[in-house]
Amino acid sequence: MSVVNYGTREITCKIVYYGPGRSGKTTNLQHVYSQLPEERKGKMVSLATETDRTLFFDFLPLDLGTISGFATRFQLYTVPGQVYYAATRKLVLQGVDGVVFVADSQSRQLAENIESLQDLHANLADEGLDPRTLPLVMQYNKRDLPPVEISSIEELDRMLNFRDVPYFSATAINGGGVFETLRSIASLVLSRLSAPAVKES
Amino acid sequence: MSDPTVAEGWVAAPLTRLKDDARLISGVLLYPTGRAVGQFGFSNAADVMSICALTSAINASARELGRQLDGKPFYEMHHTGSERQVFMARASAGAQEFLFVGVFDRESSLGVVEIYFAEFQKALEQLQPQKQATGKGPSGDFEGELNRSLDALFGPIGKR
C-alpha cells in the first residue's frame, strides 16, 4: 500500500508492470529509464537471465518531486512473465498500489494475455487486494507489428478490459505510449491518496 | 559517519547504537515487503529503495532456498567481498518482522557484527512499532500540483 509518512512528508507508491512473457514490461521500464533526467531516477535494477529474460524482477525508483508538500516517489517493478515464475510474481505484488497490465497485441498471444490477467486477479486476491478496485491501466503493446498479426484495440479491450479502465496503445520498443501509460497509473494511484483529504475538507 | 535517517522514530536509538558499536559503513532496516524503516550511510533515497527491493527479494529467495536445502528457512546471510562485506538478518518488534542489511569493511568483522546485531535484536524486541503520526494528507490544489508534476515528468497525457 502507499506509504504516506507525515513525519518526513514523503509518499512512496509501488507500481507493478504485469503481463505475459515477452509482452514488453521490461522494455517499458528501459524506456522510462533512458528518458528521465538523472536527478529524477535511481539505478535500474534488472535481475535477468543471460538471455535477458526477467528472472526475478526489474526495479526502477522514480522521484516525482514535491506534490502538496510531500516528496513523492514511485517504485516501478516488473514481474517475470513466464508461467513457471508464479511464486515470484506473487512476491513482487506484495504491497502494490497500482498495476499496468502490458498485453501483447499479437493475435496468437491472446490466450496468454487472458491467462496472465487471470493470474493477476488470483494473486491480488491472495494478497487481500480487490482486483475490482485496485488502480489498473491497460497497455496494448506491439502496435507496430503488421495489422494481420495483431488483434484490434477494440477486440483486445473487449477481451481484457472488463473494468473499463484507461487503456493505451503502445510501441514500447520505440517509446510510444510508455509515458502516457505511466502518467495515467501515477495519476490514478496518487488521486486515491487525496480522496480522504477531499472528504475531510 | 552520519546519523540514521528514519521513517519511524522509534528505531532511531537502536539503529544508531548498532551502527556505532558494530562499525557499520551503511545499513537499512526494512519491512519484508521492501519498505524502508530507517537507514544510515546513504544519501540518495533512490539508492535506499533499490537496496530495500533487493534485500526483500534476497530474503524471500534465501528462505525458500533454506527450506528446500535444509528443511528450514535461512534467516541470516553473509557475503565476503574483496573490500567490503554484507550482512543480512531479521529482527522483530511486537508481531512485526523486519529485515536488516548492513555493510562493513576491515574496521569490523562478522563476529563483531553478529554480537552487536544480537543486541540490536534484543533492543528491538523490547519496543513496539509506533503507529505513524497521522496528519493532513495531500490536499489543497493536489490535483493541480499532481498534474503539473506529471506533465513535467512524463508529458501531457495522450489520447485513449
Image: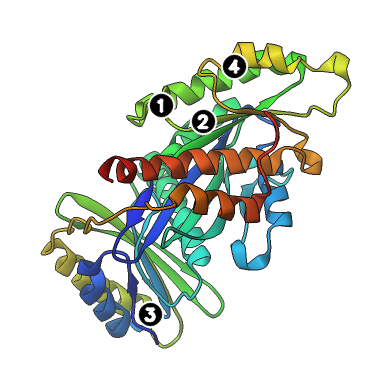
Front: mark 3 or 2: 2
Chain letter for the residue marked with disc 3 in the picture = B
Instruction: Check the picture and name the quadrant holding the N terminus of chain B.
Output: bottom left
Instruction: State the image coordinates of residue A22 (x, y, percent, origin top left).
Output: 71, 32
Residue ID for mark 4? A160
Q: CA distance from mark 3 to mark 1?
A: 43 Å
**A178 above or below A117?**
below
Residue type at numbered disc 3: Leu
Tell me the residue that label 3 is attached to.
B24
Q: Are marks 2 and 4 in contact (CB under 8 Å)?
A: no
Q: How is the image coloured?
A: rainbow
Amino acid residing under circle 2? Leu
Q: Is B101 positioned to the left or the right of B92 in the image? A: right
Q: Nearer the viewer, residue A31 or B121?
A: A31
Chain under callout 4: A
Same chain assignment for discs 4 and 1: yes
Q: Earlier in the sequence, mark 2 or mark 4?
A: 2
The label on residue B6 is: none
Asked if marks 3 and 2 fall on the same chain, the answer is no
Disc 1 target residue = A133
Residue B73 in the image: above or below residue B101: above
Of the residues shown, which amino acid type is indicated by label 4? Leu
Asked if both marks, 3 and 1, belong to the same chain, the answer given is no
- Which numbered circle lies on residue A136? 2
Please give the name of the residue rendered at 42% of the width and 49% of the height, measured from the top-left corner.
B62
Chain identity of mark 2: A
Q: Residue at x 74, y 33 (%)?
A: A170
Disc on the earlier residue, 4 or 1: 1
